[in-house]
Amino acid sequence: MNSMFAIVLPCGYFVFVFWINVAHGDMSYSLSEEMKRGSVIGNIAKDLGLQTGALSTRRARIDTEGTDKRYCDINLEHGELIVAERIDREELCGKKPSCILKQELVLENPLELHRISLHVQDVNDNSPQFNEKLISLEIHESAVKGARFVIEEASDADVGQNSVQQYSLEKNNNFILAANGNTVELVLDKELDREKQKEINLLLTALDGGSPQRSGTVGIHVTVLDANDNAPVFSQAVYKASLPENSPIGTVVTTVSATDADEGVNGDVTYDFGHVSENVKNVFGLDHKTGELKLISEIDFETVSNYDLRIKAKDGLGLSSYTKVTVHVTDVNDNSPVIYVKSLANPIPENVSPGTEVGIINVQDVDSDNSQNVRCYIQQNVPFKLVPSIKNYYSLVTTGKLDRELVSDYNITIIATDEGSPPLSSSFRSFKVQVMARDNGSPPLSSNVTVSVFISDVNDNSPQILYPAPEGSSFMTELVPKAAHGGSLVSKVIAVDADSGQNAWLSYHIIKATDPGLFSIDLHSGEIRTQRDISESDSMKQNLIVTVKDNGQPSLSATCSIYLLISDNLAEVPELKDISYDEKNSKLTSYLIIALVSVSTFFLTFIIIILGVRFCRRRKPRLLFDGAVAIPGAYLPPSYADVDGTGTLRSTYNYDAYLTTGSRTSDFKFVSSYNDNTLPADQTLKKSLSDFTEAFGELEGCSEV
């Protein structure tokens, strides 16, 4: 599992660099729970052989693992270890016979680490308590002398001598008390007679061994009944179960089972919890009929690793027995490593030598076994490296010379990976820095605070379209059946965004289409569907231009082209190379059509003029030609092609026009078809006079050109 953070190290300033001298050692102290804040636990300076004030000079501090509270602190003036938080042994260690708090003493200058074990001693601050305010028993009058009836024992949050040590029963005529270890039993000393006494009230007292002694009481109400002389018997004295911490709610932990030798109502067994805390009842549920124990809320190995449950089986008339269920919670790799900045030199001078230490980090993982082992490394190619120190501590040191004029700051990404199976990874990109504020008084006073820095995402990545592939890498065409109905799925645009949160929310839009009313795209999924049934009049080649936008501010986008072919068979399409949508080609086609219409209009006008001139010529006696010159192609169209019904150009006729230079009264033009006798427009036409006679009649007084 990976976690990362960024450290910015501007260069160009002086910084103190200390070599790390590491000393290993464990120190143990014993203290009573519930000591007042500021109470002295021991003198650390003396135990370490340091002079008074050395702890302040070396920047000593108490550190904890993970999110544990700091229960002790250091009086830097006197070198004393003092109580910083209320210590409740029962809250921390429960019924464990030994309660040890692990703290760490860190000396930064030079770096030294000492483990401190605080042995918390129990004080008698809890009284014995019974699970019920009133214990009800139903005992058959046929019970013989010496019959035993189990009573649920009292519990005491204290341990050792301060826990429950003895029981006493208020004097009565029928029962005596037998207590052996954790078992408390009422022993029938005199037979019961329902006709004389239907109910008996007793008072049971539990006493601990503390000083002063504490006690707790419970009333016992005995109802004398007929016939039930057998209590339920569990199949096991202790039930053991193992449960992974990621088990889903509803998981069956185990099933307890008890039988009763009696018949009828006296043999009907029901199950219930014995003396368990409310926290346990919030985690486990028990089926009163079947004895099935289920998980009803999430469990966490790092919070509680073992549960001890006491379950009672009771028959129809009140006889009961008890069993114990032990649930062991097994660890899974569900916690990512956490990186803490313990010390950071910022800024640093550019003339530091390679190997200079500029920071200290600590990496922790609250999981157990291999999942707790963490590897740490730097991702980028920067002139820094991590050097392992002690117990998941790393020193950030330089590996080469720094030059502020070339690079003034570095963004260093540190990745921590655990060895769980499989390794987990985590981001949101955050780190914690511990900040100490110290005044210059005598003695100096200080205060610590942990600053959590969260790096928020900015919209710096445009959407990336995965399908269809970008233009140039490949040419893909989707086939759309001719029989496709409205709402049919024909294609899909797939895109991703490297940003997170709303910056990665994508929307899809069609910005241009061959037929805007034929296809639509889903705003969120990118699915392209037909809006109506496909008809015969729809163009076979369809092109869609789709844009994908993210939800950032400002929004970033990417565009792609979708090529659709309305056909049931590729053989129906002779060529696919012209299917791509080209706006320039579309405009060029429009310009060609306009040009052809203009030329056609001009040509028709030209023909009408020629016919008019020819008609006028027949009415004149003669036309003089001094010479013929070719009209430059820039004045008249050099070649002209008609447009047939299919929209393609055909070369049928080309026309060359000529004017006379010696006549101001005649604007006669010669027209010829583009055939074997036609010359290019840039050449002069030379023909005999007889060549024109056939077309225009006899001309007089004209010389041969």
Image: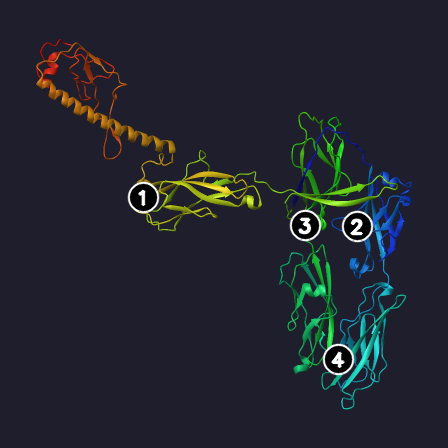
**Cα distance in 3D space between marks 3 and 1:** 59 Å
Residue positioned 12% across, 10% down in the render: 702
**Cα distance in 3D space between marks 2 and 4:** 49 Å
Disc 3 marks which residue? 335
**Cα distance in 3D space between marks 1 and 2:** 77 Å
Chain-order first, disc 2 or disc 4: 2
Residue 614 x/y as whole percent? 12, 20
Residue 113 seen anywhere in this rendered image of the structure: no
Going by the numbered disc 2, the residue's amino acid type is Arg
**Cα distance in 3D space between marks 1 and 4:** 90 Å
Marks 1 & 2, CB-CB < 8 Å contact? no
Chain-order first, disc 1 or disc 2: 2
Chain-order first, disc 1 or disc 4: 4
Marks 4 & 3, CB-CB < 8 Å contact? no
Q: Say which of marks 2 and 4 sits in front.
A: 2
Mark 2, other Cα within 10 Å: few <14 / some 14–19 / many ≥20: some
> Residue 412 or 520: which is nearer the viewer?
520
The numbered disc on residue 538 is 1
Disc 4 marks which residue? 137
Kindly indicate the quadrant of the structure image that contains residue 256. Answer: bottom right
**Cα distance in 3D space between marks 4 and 3:** 49 Å
Please indicate whether residue 550 sits to the left or right of residue 36 in the image.
left
